[in-house]
Image: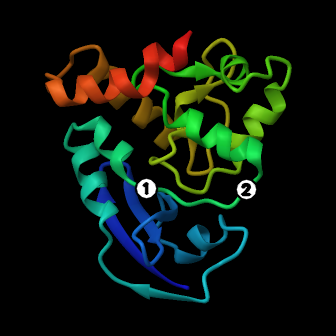
């Protein structure tokens, strides 16, 4: 497989996307270093070329205020059944409504598996599109983030401001958030 890589400028620094031939995001994060992105993959692609990605438009829309734009982007990650379930659950966490790792473990159906829930976040290669930044330590501390806690804090602040009405939210964004979260994963 040949993958396409693209780096964009964002308010949080350079953001690099790696997509497959079907334009599914394989890996992404706040870096201009292709090696850092490729290092997030279990199996790197046979070849990587610079080019335009469809997902870049969703990143631009997210930073322009449409927090739901990232939800429409298809992601493809290799992992275990638990990891896939966890990554799907992460995509259902509403912007501005972060969960703790303990709450995330409950959402995965394993309330005692807090470390496993944290591991799901740590192994997520598709940052932003699978928003692991929306999971915090008990008490609200940031915890770790592959791309730096400063980026994590900026993302959370931006999402909290939008969710609290800091800027007007479109009807489409509200509908996507309601359908996606089921009131923040149904609890």
Q: Nearer the viewer, residue 64 or 153?
A: 64
Label 1 secondary element: loop
**Height in image: 33 above or below 28?**
below
Sooner in the amino-acid sequence: mark 1 or mark 2? 1
Q: Nearer the viewer, residue 156 or 177?
A: 177
- Quickly name the residue at label 2: 79
Q: Quadrant of the N terminus?
A: bottom right
**Height in image: 174 above or below 51?**
above
Residue 106, image quadrant: top right
**Furthest residue in direction right, as rendered:** 112
Q: x%, y% of residue 41?
A: 66, 67
- Quickly name the residue at label 1: 74
Q: x%, y% of residue 152?
A: 50, 38
* 12 lies left or right of 147: left
Q: Residue at x 22, y 48 (%)?
A: 61
Q: Residue at x 56, y 9 (%)?
A: 187
Q: CA distance from mark 1 to mark 2?
A: 16 Å
* 23 lies left or right of 54: right
**Height in image: 102 above or below 172?**
above
Q: x%, y% of residue 35?
A: 60, 76
Q: Residue at x 60, y 57 (%)?
A: 125
**Height in image: 91 above or below 77?**
above
Mark 2 nearby-residue class (10 Å; few <14, some 14–19, many ≥20): some
Label 2 secondary element: loop
Residue 139, image quadrant: top right
């Amino acid at each position: 497989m040949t993958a396409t890589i693209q780096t964009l400028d964002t308010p949080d620094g350079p953001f690099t996307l790696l997509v497959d031939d079907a334009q599914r995001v394989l890996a992404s994060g706040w870096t201009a270093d292709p090696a850092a992105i490729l290092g997030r993959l279990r199996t790197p692609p046979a070849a990587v070329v610079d080019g335009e990605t469809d997902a870049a438009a969703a990143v631009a829309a997210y930073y322009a205020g449409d927090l739901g734009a990232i939800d429409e982007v298809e992601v493809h990650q290799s992992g275990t059944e638990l990891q896939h379930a966890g990554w799907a659950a992460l995509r259902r966490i509403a912007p501005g409504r972060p969960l703790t790792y303990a709450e995330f473990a409950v959402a995965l159906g394993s309330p005692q598996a807090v470390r496993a829930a944290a591991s799901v976040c740590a192994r997520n290669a598709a940052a932003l599109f699978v928003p692991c930044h929306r999971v915090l330590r008990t008490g609200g501390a940031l915890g770790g983030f592959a791309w730096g806690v400063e980026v994590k804090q900026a993302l959370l602040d931006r999402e909290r401001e939008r969710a609290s009405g800091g800027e007007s939210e479109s009807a489409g964004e509200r509908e996507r958030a309601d359908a996606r979260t089921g009131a923040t994963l149904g609890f």
